[in-house]
Structure formats: C-alpha cells, structure tokens
Image (cartoon, grey):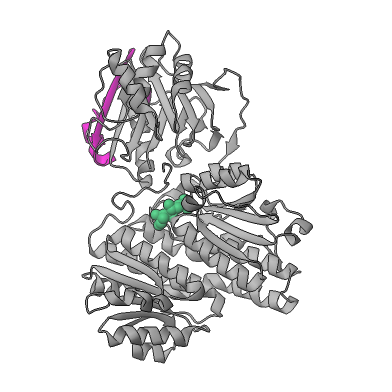
Amino acid sequence: MCGIIGYCGPRAAREVLLEGLKRLEYRGYDSAGICVGANRALTVIKRTGKIADLREIVPTGLAGNWGIGHTRWATHGEVTDVNAHPHTNCAGDIALVHNGIIENFAALKEKLVHDGHVFRSETDSEVIAHLVSDFYEGDLEAAVKETLQLLKGTYGLICVHASEPDRLVGARNGSPLVLGVGGDEMFLASDVMAILSHTKQVVYLEDGEVVRVQRDSYHASDLRDRRIDKKVETISWELDTIEKQGHPHYMEKEIFEQPDSVLRAMQGRIDHENLTAHLGGLNMTESELLGIERVKIIAAGTSFHAGLVGSYLMESIARIPCGAELASELRYRNPVVERNSLYFAVSQSGETIDTLSAMRELKRKGAKVLGVCNVVGSTIARESGAGVYIHSGPEIAVASTKAFTSQLTVFYLFTLLLARMHNMSFEGGKEFVDGLAALPDLIRGGFEEQNHIRALAEKYSRYRDFLFLGRGLNYPVALEGALKLKEISYIHAEGYSAAEIKHGPIALINEETPSIFLVPNDRLREKVISNMKEVKARKGKVIALCASGDEEVRDTADDVITVPRAGEIWYPFLMVVPLQLFAYYTALKLGRNVDQPRNLAKSVTVE
Ligand code: M6R
C-alpha cells in the first residue's frame, strides 16, 4: 500500500527520496510525489504513474537537503495528480505525507472549509496539513501533536514546515513508521526497504508515538509530551537480497529461491538427536506445549492458504484439533476464545491490518497468539511478543511465493514438535525429519519442468477462465494456484476441492474452461482421477500435476506437469511451485506487470 519516506542530512534530498520511493514501488501504488525544502520554502512535485515518470518532472538541480516522499495507493479520491501526496496547507509552508485512513475527515474538512481553508484534493489526508497549520505557532511538533488528538483512524505520517529546515516530524498510529539512523543523516520510512541502502540501524515506532528528527538527533515522545527512550536495532537483511540479481522480475527470483528459503526456515530448528523440532521463538515450556488442546491459524491471502495446509497437517499428524480462518472474518464475529487454545497470526509482511486487528481482538479476549512473520520487527511480530520467523528474506513481488513455502515449513516443524510430544514414534520422527531434509532438493528437481510449464502457460494463455482443483493437503494449494493466476495475469480463476465440482462448478465446464488438477500419489488419487474423467466427459481441457511416472494420469489428462515423487505430506511444496511458474509465464505472455499487478498492494495496511 502507500509508502512514505523522509530524509534530512547532507545529501541532495531529491535523490534520496526518489531512490527510496523506487524501493517502495513493490508495495503497489498509482501515483507518487516528493517535497523538498530549501531556503525556507517547500517545493512539491507529484503526479500519477510510476516513479520513473515522477523523476522526469523533478528538476535534476532541485536544491534542498531535507524532504518527504510518498507512493499513493488510492483510497479516498481518484488517481489524479492533485490527489497524490505530499499535501500542503493553504499557504504552502506545511507539507505532509500520510499512510492510513482518517475516518472522521469529512467532519474535520467541513469545519476547516467553513473557517476559510481551501482544499485542493479529495483525499482524507489533506485535512491533516490544514489542521497542523491552524495549530502552528512556531513549533511543528507541537502543532502535529495537537492535530493528532483530533484524528480518528490510522496514520503513519511525516510532516515538514518551510520555516523549520532540516526537521521532520513523524507519527504513527496503525500504519508502520521506522526511523533510520545514519552517521550524520536520518530517515523516516514506512518500511525498511526504503532505507536499507543507507543504514541498517533502525528504531521502530509504536502506535501513539511521535518523533522529531534532525540530521544528527531524534526525540521520541507520546502525545502528552512524555519522552520515550527507543532502542536502536540492526536489520539483518543484506542489500543484495533486495536486488533482482539477474532475474527479469522479483517474482521469478523469489520462485527460484525456494530451495534455499525453505532450507533457511528449517535451519537450526531440527533436533536430530531427539528427532523433533526446536522453535525457541515460541517461548513456551514443555508443559505449556503439552497443554495445547487446539490450534487456530488466522491470516489473509496466501498466508491463509499456507495456514489451511498447516491446519490439515497438524490435525492429521499431531492429532490436535486445528483450523484456519480468514482474519478479516474472525475479527468481526466476536470469536469465542477457548481455554488451552493456541493461535497463530500468519503474515509475510507482519503489517496486514486484518490479521493485526484480529490478533489484537484475540489478545483482548485473553488468547495466546504467536506470530508467524517474515519481516523482522514488523508490527505483528512485535505485538505478538513470541512466534516464529520464517526467514524467507525480503519478498518484493506483490505475488507471494517463497513466503508460502517457508510458512509451510514452519507449520511442518510445529507439527513435528507437537506430534513427537503426543503420538509420533522415534521412527516416525526420523521419517519426518528425513522428509524435511529432502525438501530443498525435491523443490529444485521440480524446476526441471520449467520450460515445459512455460510452453503450457503460453498455450493456455488465451483462455479467460480456469478451475484449480485439489484435495486434502492440496486443496489449499489449488486455492493458492488460482490466486496466483488471477492476481498477476488477470485471468479469472477459481480454486475448489475437486470433490466439490459436482456441487456447482461443473456447470462451468466446457471447451473454454480448462481445469488444473493436482493429483499427487496420495490416498485420494483415484478419486481425483475420477473427477478428471468427469471433466473430460464434458469436453473440458485438463492439465494435471502428478508425480513423475504416473502413466494413468498422463493418459487421462490433455497435458501433464510432473513433480518429483515424494511421501504424500510433502506434495504441497512440490505442487505449488509449478503453479507459481504457470501464473508467472502466463502473465509474461500476456504482457502484464508481473511484480506490481494492477490494483494490488504488497502489504495491505488499510481495511
Ligand atoms: O503480508 P501478508 O502475508 O499478511 O499478506 C496477506 C495477503 O495480502 C497476501 O498474501 C496477498 O494475498 C498476496 N498478494 C498473495 O500473493
């Protein structure tokens, strides 16, 4: 979603801001802008389109060593130049960038207009700039604090005033904001990607905190002016992990990283002596773990699909009742929190508002909620207080790929841990651990089908509707395959349990609606083959993903993609990779913007 950056230091702000915005592109946006301060004046330049378009209209010689920038993902008001941020007050001496939604903006705006303020945009954010100017009496930080008391909603914001050079005022409530501490320069940003090339020293702001930043110092406080001592933390990600490293797209890079990212998710977490998993971040004693009577996983999108696989696995292998639910649904249905339940809030970004809000509600009800996040220091990771990092490394493509398989890895490890405490024998533990260890090579083996998958994607790219069908552990993978295809190729795709087609979707089958079947050699294989035949009997095209050497599936399907043969619980890892590639190559063939598909944001921080 929207991204923000602020800078003050010795360098030309223009370059730092434009580079920072470029790094935030992955979050998804439709317009962008910067404001640079110099000689007690502010220059605001903004427009719809890409950062490259913005760069074209920013004069190369734009002087000024401090400023703010923004990528906008429209919520209030259309995608227009005027609605892009930064926004200014009437006099143009205050500028602001804002992420989040001001829920009471209409009432505030009405009063401001009545008092003579002239609004230029349709955004909710602009009210903040006008309010700050009403409260301003020579102290920007004080005026921002007065303003914040009137706002209802969420914000991560940075404000500047022409008469206070080299100064940024940032504030956070519900939208992330991080301070980057350089040698003789400071940064503010909505996420660390924007500043990683400059500094790895960061301070994460919490809700309700305001920070005043100058090039050599910062001061954090709450709305009642009480000083807050903040801890400086070091980001572990390396700069090269956020580069494409020779791949044409981040998505391709991230798909092919999966043997390594899955390995990272399990590294140091397997206890080979006791044939169990060791997940220190859970912060739970053995007796607490033994006391777990049910597990619930909450998440959105791809993370939800990973949670579904996790819940099926945990229940069948560790024999603990387990379910996964969309966080957006759970949060508004007044859920019952049962004693001895354990919740996982799963989120690659750790910032998804639905998951975060559901987690907060569960915690209010006394639930124990653990985070399963990728981004270290993200809000869900910090607020959950305990959990497991998936260690995928930065995932930049909007379409989530490697996070999915790393999330699975964490759930497989947790399943091993619980199962070994309950019903899994030492030999069973050995088999499971061996299965985990074999995964990276098996995933790598699946890449051998890369060219064939590309050819199939090109062959089928003219179709407008697809069904993705799987069963058991591979039913959520079918959902994930459909999500991948629709989000980056804009082709309509539905994921279903193969068993469900008779209950409705089979009505869609004809020559123009291909079905992609997941048919591993598991206990439901025969049933899925029957479903394939039902589709074939209705002239539907069938592409089947099956274990190598499965001639019966090959004979039934129109086209086949094989995956390495494995024990049945490992197929979700092996089936999802070809589906990611299929979506990727289809989108390429159709000329889509693979890494930044239309209307989508990497991190969904508004409801
Ligand atoms: O960061 P999160 O894992 O919480 O994100 C959840 C979804 O927004 C995300 O998985 C989304 O569905 C992706 N675009 C899927 O590729």
Of residue 140 and residue 129, the one placed in the foreground of this image is: 129
Residue in the picture at 24% in, 65% down: 589
Residue in the picture at 31% in, 56% down: 594
The image quadrant of residue 53 is: top left
Q: Quadrant of the N terminus?
A: top left
In the drawing, does residue 421 fall left or right of residue 18? right
In the drawing, does residue 274 fall left or right of residue 260? right
Instruction: From the top left corner, tell me how far across and down residue 529 is, in percent.
Output: 41, 86
Taking the magenta stretch, the answer to whether it contains residue 586 is: no
Can residue 263 be seen here? no
In the current view of this chain or complex, which residue is farthest to the top? 137
The image quadrant of residue 91 is: top left
Can residue 100 be seen here? yes
Residue in the picture at 57% in, 17% down: 225
Magenta stretch in the rendered image: 39-67
Number of on-image labels: 0
Residue in the picture at 39% in, 28% down: 104
Of residue 560 and residue 599, the one placed in the foreground of this image is: 599
Instruction: From the top left corner, tell me how far across and down residue 437 is, in percent.
Output: 60, 71
Whether residue 455 is situated above or below residue 13 in the rendered picture: below
Whether residue 486 is situated above or below residue 425 in the rendered picture: above
Q: Quadrant of the C terminus?
A: top left
Of residue 454 and residue 388, the one placed in the foreground of this image is: 388
In the drawing, does residue 63 fall left or right of residue 338? left
Instruction: From the top left corner, tell me how far across and down residue 173 is, in percent.
Output: 49, 32
Whether residue 60 is situated above or below residue 112 in the rendered picture: below
